[in-house]
Image: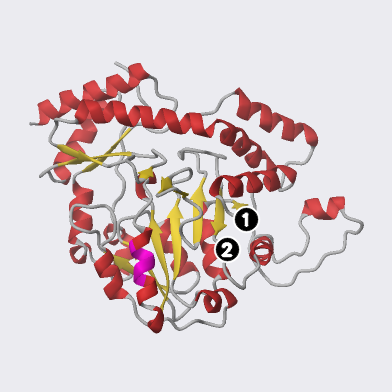
Amino acid sequence: MMNIPFSPPDITQAEIDQVVEVLKTGWITTGPKTKLFEQRIAQMCNTQKAVCLSSQTSCAEMTLRILGIGPGDEVIVPAYTYTASASIIYHVGATPVLIDCKKDSYEMDYDKLEEAINEKTKAIIAVDLAGIVCDYDRIFEIVESKRDLFKPSDNPIQFALGRIIVMSDAAHAFGAQYKGKMCGEIADFTNFSFHAVKNMTTAEGGAATWKEIPGIDSNEIYKKFMLMTLHGQTKDAFAKNKGASWEYDVVDTQYKCNMPDILSAMGLAQLDRYEAMLSRRHELIKRYNEAFKDLPISVLNHADHTHRSSGHLYFVRFIGKDADYRNAFYDKMKSKGVMCNVHFKPLPMFTAYKAKGFDIKDFPNAYDMHKAQLTLPMNTVITDEQADYVIKCFIETLKEMG
């Protein structure tokens, strides 16, 4: 029996060498490696700037704060997502409005999204689930059609855009493409995760990118991110060390969520290998798809003439089955040494969101997708032999379960 972990990090000597190099310099917190990492992410995403922070969550929360979103505002978010997509809305004092999935889809119902917009709506957080860029054409069509309802707060970016802001929770989607554009240049603001289980990892970390906004200097947005994520301090440690004076100011009481050079060094090595890793993920997707094509399951479309996903997660949905079936299937796969996962429990199923008044009965499509969903191991550490073992165990278990 083989033991197949779900999502081990793909760490090679290249990452180790980069980290050791940083350790030897004596400069291990935010410094030149992080600035270089930001430049390379911006280059890959076709944006002028990128900011690297401690997590996707911190990137997304700081984005909301820079946008001036807070008490009295509403932010629309899918019910079918991880809690980080919505918890940040509570952090800034705004109100999340959860949207059910479209029937037989993991994406939110865009018609219901359109209906939910009112004068309090300041932003929409779309989620690029499993690394597949969602339908931003439709989202932007909706926000343009609702310009007359938008009431900007006293915030220059809100005034400049003059409409609801479109944010992307692209925690799964670094490197994904849609209609010739890279994830990171599609939504107004995009936030990535580099957590240990992600396609590209810095162990912990994330990045924010944004499109150019007429009348707004991207360098000023970058400076706001820097101030907000280092206590409102006008110089970081590296700048003080290299500058003519130690003197600095604290211009606001802010937060602490910067990315250190040790983690950025790992990310730089991962970026060098990223296209090869992404190609390997798509090889595995094709391998799974071919093996499963005649089975009574549905899988996601990770690539066609319009898009290429980041290949982050391989979802399987059991047609006509319930949560008991899915859970028993998970247990059988585990007993054979294959670790699977479930992505995700819709937010209204969690205690925290129930306490805030949400009820899963109001989100029937999200529950219907969740109850029969299983995620198979797919990563760039797995070998062809191991992938074939996953396929063998899956088909065997499907026969055993009936």
Up-down relation of residue 112 to residue 36 (above or below): below
Which residue is pictured at 28% across the width and 62% down the height?
348
Quadrant hosting residue 210 = bottom right
Residue 352 visible somewhere in the drawing: no
Residue 290 spot, x, y in % from top left: 24, 27
Q: Which residue is mark 1?
A: 48
State the extent of the magenta-drawn residues as a range. Answer: 138-142
Quadrant hosting residue 89 = bottom left
- Of mark 2 and mark 1, the one earlier in the sequence is 1
Q: Amino acid at mark 2?
A: Glu
Q: Which residue is mark 2?
A: 212
Q: Amino acid at mark 1?
A: Gln
Label 1 Cα neighbours within 10 Å, binned few <14 / some 14-19 / many ≥20: some
Quarter of the figure with the N terminus = top left
Task: Identify the main secondary structure in magenta.
Answer: helix
Element on which disc 1 rests: loop
Residue 306 visible somewhere in the drawing: yes
CB of mark 2 within 8 Å of CB of mark 1?
Answer: yes
Give left or right: position of 115 versus 65.
Answer: left
